[in-house]
Image (cartoon, grey):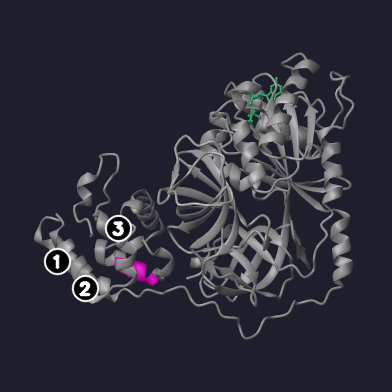
Amino acid sequence: MIDADAGKSKTESDTQLPFEFEVSVQIIDRPRRFLTFESRNTFTNALTGDKLTRQLESQVSNKRRKIYHEHGNLLNFFTNPSEAVKKTIKKNLEKSKLGPSSDKDKVSKLADDVSKVKISKPAPVKKPATVSKPKQKINLDLELKKKNEKPNLSFVVIGHVDSGKSTMTGRLLYDLNIVDSKTLHKLTKESESIGKASFSLAWIMDQTSEERNRGITVDICQTQFETKQSSFTIIDSPGHKDYVPQMINGVTQADLAIAIIDASSFESGFIADGQTKEHLTIAKSLGIEKCILLINKMDVVGWSKDRYDEIKGQLTEFLTDELKYVKDDLIFLPASGYLGDNIVKKSKNLPWYSGSSLIELLESENKSVNHKIDKKSPFVMTINDVMESSKNDELTVSGRINSGLIQPGESISISPSQQTALIHSITITKSNVGSSLVKNEAQKLAIEGEFVELKLKKLDNWENIKVGDLCSLANNPIKPCNKFSCELQCFELTRLLLIGTPFVMFRNNISIPARLSSIELVNGKKNKKKHLRSNTVSTVTIEILERDMPLLTFGENKKLGRVVIRKDGFTVAAGKILDLLHE
Ligand SMILES: Nc1nc2c(ncn2[C@@H]2O[C@H](COP(=O)(O)OP(=O)(O)OP(=O)(O)O)[C@@H](O)[C@H]2O)c(=O)[nH]1
């Protein structure tokens, strides 16, 4: 069963690591979540003579991802190393073409080590004996009222490549005086010097040299800003089709989407493989109910009302008929991000448009957010970033609070590693875009919708904490699992979606290999077929392939209970998690 000759199929581009043969790579890393760092280190050391470094670990891990689906059954061998399995491993390793005798010694030592490796199964979820109370007693109603005086609206900017997302965002921040003219002047000079003068506004958001040289956004850029009445988080996402996963991550953190549509080349973004349709489909599938459709580059089409009406008509038909958006939740706005028409200032070039400017629309949406916190809804936060720490039991994590509220002094559980930690402090970072000025404001209370940093203490080991993990109150731990039933909506498919075929599943900011393990109902009827077709709604069971994941059902959380499925670089389906199937 173990393919000892797997190494023969290597291609030249698939560089062989100095110590590597493919069987062993999987043995080391396949059940990574369940091995202590120490065990992984002992094992790598036995194999390579090297200490396990982050670089080595990530090399191994990348390889594993590529070849995992061919050898997934090795997990069973490794997690249950019975005598028979140990013998099989030893036999196959010896058979493998490792060459000279010194390698044979290594093989034999390695096989012995397999039996010694400790496998730490995920700890059973147990309620901690004591749950610590908040450090400070606060008047909750008063604090919530204060928070709601300036509620935070998070919006994501989406759309086809080069439609003008970063330029519009830069213009918005510049016209609100959040970016000063000195910064813009510097960016203009820098962009002129490499012959990309028209990108100076976009560079306010596109800050990496890769983004500036290529003239495209490659990852989300998030920043918080305030006006007199409102507080906003703006997330600029990439439009290029190679970066849809990053765009999905941006959408999962937003309350509202602004889709930027290029009036001068609307059709190229709207046809089959353009990103306008795909982005809007993803936004709706991930629970974005309200959308501003900003028809951009109106200066290029001579501020034409006919062109605007034509685009508005086609988009409305697609959004209401195919994506089932409610017409009143779609707001259309003609604008020029480059010249600033209808962004902050009302346009004189568009006399036929009597509606609001973008900032007016955002302020009015912000008021309607007015987070009505259900004080009893459970605290859940997705980890967006982990700031490494020099102390093993301390760590700062950042993320958006998905539901509920939290105070310093409370203890939390982090899933899937099931560790508990004490919240030492909570801060909100407000950065001044384009400058290095960063304000960290300490919070007595943090609530649903806020982007916060939690300084954690009393952790067992921060090594096991990863982006995408879920935090909850310590007395309400989230049990990880690898199977769930799901209501799945398939989009236009170029090939049938077969039971067993792997795909990539996105949940919030995590992407992970998964597959359909059974199909129960298709369009409401019992089903015996082994595949799904385009435009069907089905009830299916999905199995996650790499590890157990912390999941919540759609009933528990309307955002975290959703998944998007992509295959061969296309978004093929989206679903709602109905039930978790714990084994
Ligand atoms: N004439 C005109 N040009 C614009 C307008 N908005 C953006 N552009 C130009 O369009 C080009 C692309 O703009 P970006 O803001 O980088 O586009 P983007 O959508 O952020 O690009 P990606 O993030 O890579 O998808 C730049 O040359 C901009 O100057 C506009 O309103 N009018």
Residue 580 coordinates in the image, percent (x, y): 55, 65
Q: At 46% across and 58% down in the image, what residue appears?
A: 543
Q: At 87% across and 20% down in the image, what residue appears?
A: 352
Q: CA distance from mark 2 to mark 3?
A: 20 Å
Q: Determine the quadrant in which ligand 1 lies.
A: top right
Q: Which residue is mark 1?
A: 105
Q: CA distance from mark 1 to mark 2?
A: 21 Å
- 406 up-or-down from 517: above or below: below
Residue 540 visible in the current orientation: yes
- 294 up-or-down from 385: above or below: above
Residue 189 coordinates in the image, percent (x, y): 66, 26
**Dot 2 surroundings within 10 Å: few (below 14), some, or many (20 or more)?**
few
Mark number, residue 25: 3
Tell me if 540 is positioned left or right of 233 in this view.
left
- 62 up-or-down from 402: above or below: above
Q: Is residue 387 magenta?
A: no
| Mark closest to the chain's N terminus, 1 or 2 | 2
Identified by mark 2, the residue type is Ala
| Mark closest to the chain's N terminus, 1 or 3 | 3
Q: Which residue is mark 2?
A: 84
Identified by mark 3, the residue type is Val
Magenta region? 38-43
